[in-house]
């Protein structure tokens, strides 16, 4: 980077030139008539350093579920707060209500992101809709010796002859939530009348004074918020996630929504078209962890930008390698797309991050949304063998003292894919030890590595860190 003084000429140390002699005479009281004033050399304007993003623009700040660091997630205050904090995009998780309306909730089971448990204590109608029927175990179809993990996964199709049996259990993509309430058992009017959104992540550290006070929003309402906040030449995008598409489709079919095998995705594409958003340049990005869902939406005419999300289960802090295979239900929940399990495909999310996997993604998507440790390798060096009590040492995020960018950004960019990384949070427990509790340090590491965008629970912090990064680049 060119510094402000780098273009200034240096004065000679010895007066051997005519100019130097004249200046010396003047300094000693020579005639004013012979004064020679040197012409100042202009300081050149520094050339901004280019961004490392795939499109050459500044990385995006994506308001992950709005601004849940300060407000109950996916509520109006959260989305308006994210917009006011400078976010470029408003992200939301989308499900279908009982009456086939697209609504925004992080999870389809409601006890962890609404006040439904409190409401049920005094509302008998709500209380009786709790799902209590256990799911059933189904054998996997892929080779266990090759791919590992459990031999069976949990299904909510308790009676294969009755597709409506999925309305009795609450098993979402292999994850058991028996004894909870399903979003698909309530109409949008009931969801708005009875329940309010709450904090979810770091709920013991984030403000809770507005919990239960703000109703659940429809996807259309979030689009309307983005439009209302798009002023002064600024255009906010919306970033809906087609959440748990296999589960949502099975629920929607049982509830009589739409026709065919994909009423969930059909509703998403219809709403996009109804808002005249179905172009590549429209202010919307559609995301999902499940490639089958994204490919289906492409097949029925979705023309927006599309993002393939990529998950994982854990990190080996000795090597920095990702862990995908586990011996519990999360082998199916976070280890691979659920459609792969159903189809007998035993591969894991990590296969998407190979050059071949990225090339496949490029056939239907415009970008990827990987988990942070897939983009920034986290290691502990030196890695001790045991804890003080002699038990095996496995390490923790707080102990991480080395970070190194992986090849994911470079390979994705080479394939023509942008990289939006999840999820950035301010609380110390979510930060690698090397950042010393400073969330800005984490953002800067990823901005410098060339990410195209960040999913953030604290949009204001992400925006402030981006301003620091822009200054580093001379912008």
Image (spheres, rainbow, N blue to C red):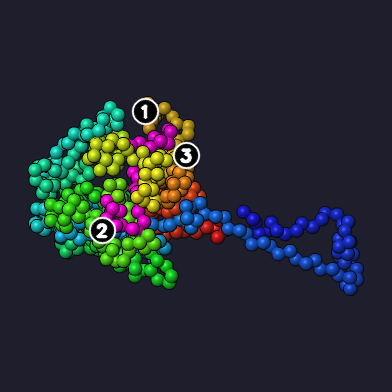
- State which quadrant residue 10 falls in: bottom right
**Magenta-colored stretch includes residue 448:** no
Q: Is residue 4 visible?
A: yes
Q: Is residue 317 above or below residue 220?
A: above
Q: Is residue 1 left or right of residue 443?
A: right
Secondary structure category for the residue under label 2: helix
Is residue 121 or residue 126 the one in the foreground?
126
Q: Circle 3 is placed at which residue position?
A: 401
Kind of element beneath mark 3 = loop
The residue labelled by disc 2 is 268
Residue 79 seen in the current view: no
What is the span of residues highlighted in magenta in the rendered image? 296-324
Between residue 67 and residue 407, name the one nearer to us: 407
In the orientation shown, which residue stands out farthest toward the bottom?
33
Which residue is more in the foreground, 207 or 112?
112
Q: Looking at the picture, how far across and down is residue 185, in whole percent?
A: 14, 55
> Disc 2 or 3, which lies upstream in sequence?
2
Q: Earlier in the sequence, mark 2 or mark 1?
A: 2
Residue in the picture at 91% in, 68% down: 30
Q: Residue at x 41, y 57 (%)?
A: 61
Q: Residues within 10 Å of mark 2 (few under 14, many from 20)?
A: many
Kindly report the distance in space between the C-alpha atoms of the residues bearing marks 1 and 3.
19 Å
143 to 291, vertically: above or below: above
- Label located before the other in sequence (1 or 3): 1
Q: Is residue 313 magenta?
A: yes
Discs 2, 3 touching: Cβ within 8 Å: no
Residue 392: give its label. Answer: 1
User: Are the residues at dot 1 and dot 3 in contact (C-beta closer than 8 Å)?
Assistant: no
| The C terminus - image quarter | bottom right
For disc 1, the neighbor class at 10 Å (few under 14, some 14 to 19, many from 20) is few
């Amino acid at each position: 980077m060119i510094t402000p003084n780098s273009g200034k000429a240096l004065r000679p140390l010895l007066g051997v030139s005519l100019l130097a002699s004249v200046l010396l005479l003047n300094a000693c009281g020579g005639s004013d008539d012979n004064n020679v004033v040197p012409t100042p050399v202009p300081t050149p304007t520094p050339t901004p350093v280019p961004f490392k993003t795939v499109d050459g623009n500044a990385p995006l700040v994506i308001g992950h579920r709005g601004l849940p660091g300060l407000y109950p997630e996916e509520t109006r205050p959260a989305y308006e707060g994210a917009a006011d904090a400078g976010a470029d995009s408003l992200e939301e998780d989308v499900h279908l209500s009982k009456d086939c309306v697209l609504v925004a909730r992080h999870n389809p089971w409601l006890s962890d992101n609404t006040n439904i448990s409190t409401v049920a204590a005094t509302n008998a109608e709500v209380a009786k809709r709790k799902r209590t029927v256990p799911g059933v175990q189904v054998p996997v179809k892929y080779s266990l010796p090759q791919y590992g993990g459990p031999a069976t996964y949990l299904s909510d199709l308790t009676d294969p002859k009755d597709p409506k049996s999925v309305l009795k259990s609450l098993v979402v993509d292999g994850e058991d939530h028996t004894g909870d309430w399903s979003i698909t058992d309530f109409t949008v009017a009931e969801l708005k009348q009875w329940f309010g959104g709450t904090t979810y992540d770091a709920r013991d550290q984030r403000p809770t004074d507005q919990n239960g006070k703000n109703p659940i929003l429809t996807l259309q309402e979030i689009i309307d918020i983005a439009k209302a906040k798009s002023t002064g030449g600024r255009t906010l995008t919306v970033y809906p996630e087609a959440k748990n598409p296999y589960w949502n489709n099975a629920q929607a079919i049982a509830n009589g929504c739409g026709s065919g095998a994909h009423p969930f995705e059909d509703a998403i594409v219809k709403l996009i078209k109804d808002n005249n958003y179905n172009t590549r340049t429209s202010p919307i990005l559609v995301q999902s962890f499940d490639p089958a869902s994204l490919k289906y939406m492409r097949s029925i005419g979705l023309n927006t930008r599309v993002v393939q999300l990529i998950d994982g289960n854990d990190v080996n802090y000795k090597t920095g390698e990702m862990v995908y295979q586990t011996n519990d239900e999360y082998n199916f929940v976070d280890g691979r797309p659920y459609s792969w399990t159903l189809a007998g495909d035993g591969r894991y999310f990590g296969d998407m991050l190979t050059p071949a996997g990225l090339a496949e993604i490029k056939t239907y998507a415009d970008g990827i949304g990987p988990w942070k440790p897939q983009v920034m390798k986290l290691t502990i060096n030196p890695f001790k063998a045991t804890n003080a009590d002699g038990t095996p040492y496995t390490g923790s995020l707080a102990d991480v003292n080395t970070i190194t960018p992986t090849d994911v950004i470079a390979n994705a960019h080479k394939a023509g894919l942008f990289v939006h990384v999840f999820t950035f949070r301010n609380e110390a427990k979510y930060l690698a030890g090397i950042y010393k509790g400073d969330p800005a340090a984490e953002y800067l590491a990823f901005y410098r590595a060339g990410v195209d965008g960040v999913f953030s629970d604290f949009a204001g912090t992400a925006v402030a860190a981006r301003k620091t990064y822009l200054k580093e680049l001379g912008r």
